Amino acid sequence: MELLALYIDTHFLFHKSEYLNFGGAFIFDFKFIEGELIIEKKENPKYIKNFFGDNISNISAVVGNNGVGKTSIMRVLNRDTKCQIISIYLEDDIIIIHDQAGIDFKTDFEYISISPSQELYPLYYSTHIDYNLKNISSVISQSNLIEDSLEDYYYSTILRQVFFLNQKGSFLQKNYINFPFYENLVIKVNQVDKSTFLNSEFYKNATIGKSITKQLEMLWNHYAISNEAAIHGNFNFLNNFEVFILSLLVSDDTYMQTNDNGTFGDFQKVLDQNDFHDKLEMFLTKRLDNIDGPLCKTLENSVGINFNNVTELIEKVKAYPITKIAGGFKFELIKKQAILTIKRYSSVWKLYNFISRNSKILVFDKPNEINLSVKKDTSEDFLKRFFELYQNVHQSIQYLQFEFRIFNVFPQKKLSTGEQSLLNFYSSIYSFVGKGEQHLRKHNQYLLLLDEPETGYHATWKKKFIKSITEIVPELFNELDQKPSIQIVFTTHDALTLSDIPNDNITYLKKLKNSNIKVFKNDDPEKPQKSFGANITDLLADSFFVDDGLMGDFAKEKIQETINWLHSFINESKVNPEVSEDIINNHEAIIKIIDEPLLNYKLTEMFQTVFPNRIDKENTAKQIKDLAQKAGINLKDLV
């Protein structure tokens, strides 16, 4: 499915109804004739199928100056506003309309209607951290990723970036050859106050919550940190890891009550085990028994509940024959929870075991932190494996009662604003597609709404932007089983990016003198006529992008002052007037630094007309000889 056009009946931006076409196979015209809305369709002669690749249905742009309402248009596309709109789609040569406006209209074509749930699922992204953007519903926008504090946002952002670079960095480096990777990382176990766990209303009031509170206190007493305010003592890395992960797992020690819940007994059995491996296996047994006692017994008797046979355990759960249990519960849900629990505990053990086995080659500058370096004694493969294991754990614990990072990662290299902007964009998408099977990740088509995504990029990167998203974005979404198609609409006020976009795919917005917003239609003579493959200078020269020429206002003002100053003498035919030497030198210096050759030549000529006594005769004679030589003229012939 592809969005072809959008009709906006009422919106504060516009003084009348407006519509946008996005450059698809058909172009639509919306007219009111005798009080009735008429929608007309015609083929787009410039449309090229699969122009941006097989998995990207189309890329369009909304362009305009600051304050023209580009983000407001994005809100409409993201379905965050209550304005009355009509959306027109195309799927398998069938025109599809969703009429949110609720107004009568006629068409000159056949179509089918759909409900909101059948539309393209929008994903809005903005690199800006802005409180005003938090009310835009989106799981990938930077403003919506800020949760409790800037500190949490920072560590979570670094983690997203590291996971992305670890798995998909090669695609980024293919497009941005010199993009820097994090090569030296300091890793510490996250530190959380106990009150974060204990002050939860659930744990205070619910019966099972009180049981979990007791288990947490038992755990912290066991690790001799009962008097500490924080969750661990921050002394030893592996010890901190044990306490932190066990605290998280205890917080998840809840289960659906059925007739078949087991009777594992006291949590003390877990704590009494000799080492972390045994504690974790015993805790897994406890959890499976709580989920379903008979299933747990079957697993214990058939293959044994241990981390050496995780694959067999999962297969046994899948093959378990009962589909329903007393009370009408679907046993498939119980089995799904059991499999998720086995994978969660197994991934935790794999990460812990990897760190423990490699503790001799890991660099512990301090007992409570690891220093990872690609260029030192740990190889790139080692770093890759570490973060693969960590990512598996991170994803497996995301839906616990408390969603905490296990590790805080401190990169020693500081990235530039542009590098951060680029990395945040791709890592946010990667984080979205990697969060497991939730309903948001099961759509077959997505509408990716990018609000000035190239902010902070150098001009060289802006030129690469479209090519990179056509290659990297599909690769990221291909992580989803359904391999969805993507349509992209982005906003910008920069002409540089538009040389990769066909002109029919661009919506131009402009604020008029009366403050109304104008949407340029294809037949508007004032609409910029060049974009795809156009010279950047030609794009910038269009008055839509730069009013009153390309020269900067500061330079224009300085040069105009010099022109006016020279004219004041030329108009009165004054030669070598008595003027302060500092003033003369200042204007002469300005003329010399003007890089536009014709303007430099004309102002030099004016200056020499007013101040002939300052002409550098030797330099002038040399220039005359050079010009004569280039023109093939013998100066003696002119005498």
Image (cartoon, rainbow, N blue to C red):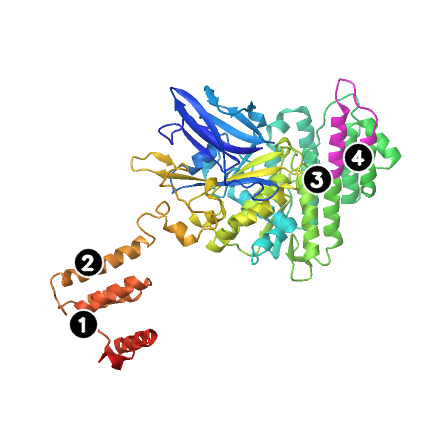
Q: Which mark is residue 612?
A: 1
Q: What stretch is highlighted in magenta?
A: 317-343
Nearer-N-terminus badge (1/4): 4
Q: Quadrant of the N terminus?
A: top right
**Could you tell me residue 335's position as x and y percent?**
77, 29
Q: Residue 225 carries which label?
A: none
Cα distance, mark 4 to mark 2? 89 Å
Secondary structure beneath disc 1?
Answer: helix
Q: Name the residue type under label 3.
A: Leu
Q: Mark 4 points at which residue?
A: 285
Nearer-N-terminus badge (1/3): 3
Q: Are marks 2 and 1 in contact (CB under 8 Å)?
A: no
Q: Name the residue under label 3.
A: 246
Q: Which residue is drawn at 56% across and 58% down?
A: 178
Q: Residue at x 20, y 73 (%)?
A: 614
Cα distance, mark 2 to mark 3? 78 Å
